[in-house]
Image: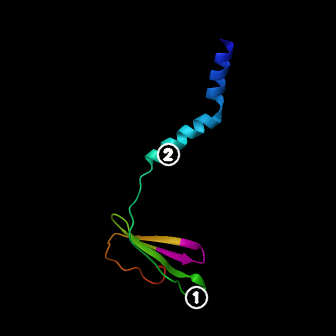
Amino acid sequence: MINFFIFLIILFVNPQFSEQKTRVQDIKSHESVKIFDLKTFSSGPMGIGLVKSYHNESNKVCIYSTIQGQKKVEFNNKLTVCPDKFPE
């Protein structure tokens, strides 16, 4: 009987078991976003400029490579064309 209680204590105290449960919950709660019309571009000098554009369900998304890193700009209109340079 004592062995059974020790087993239960180890089972509930061991963080490995609780981590796996939370990971499964996170995966189930994650919402996927559909991407349409994915386009990649060769950027300008030193790799700076428009890199990628796509449509998600409601917006046009433009990804730029800048000196500070990658920046993402979302436009409400799907028909918008991404400018070649990052809008400031």
- Identify residue for label 2: 26
Looking at the figure, which quarter contains the N terminus? Answer: top right
Residue 24: where, in percent of width, then height? 51, 42
Quarter residue 4 falls in: top right
**Residue kind at label 1, given as amino acid type:** Pro
Quarter residue 77 falls in: bottom left
Residue 56: where, in percent of width, then height? 37, 65
Query: Callout 1: few (<14), some (14-19), or many (20+) C-alpha neighbours within 10 Å?
Result: few
Measuring 42% from the left and 82% from the top, which residue is drawn there? Answer: 83
**Is 61 or 12 nearer to us in this picture?**
12
| Alpha carbon distance from label 1 to label 2 | 41 Å
- Identify residue for label 1: 45
Nearer-N-terminus badge (1/2): 2
**Magenta span contains residue 38:** no
Q: Viewed as shown, does residue 35 lie left or right of 6?
A: left
Please give the range of residues in magenta: 63-70
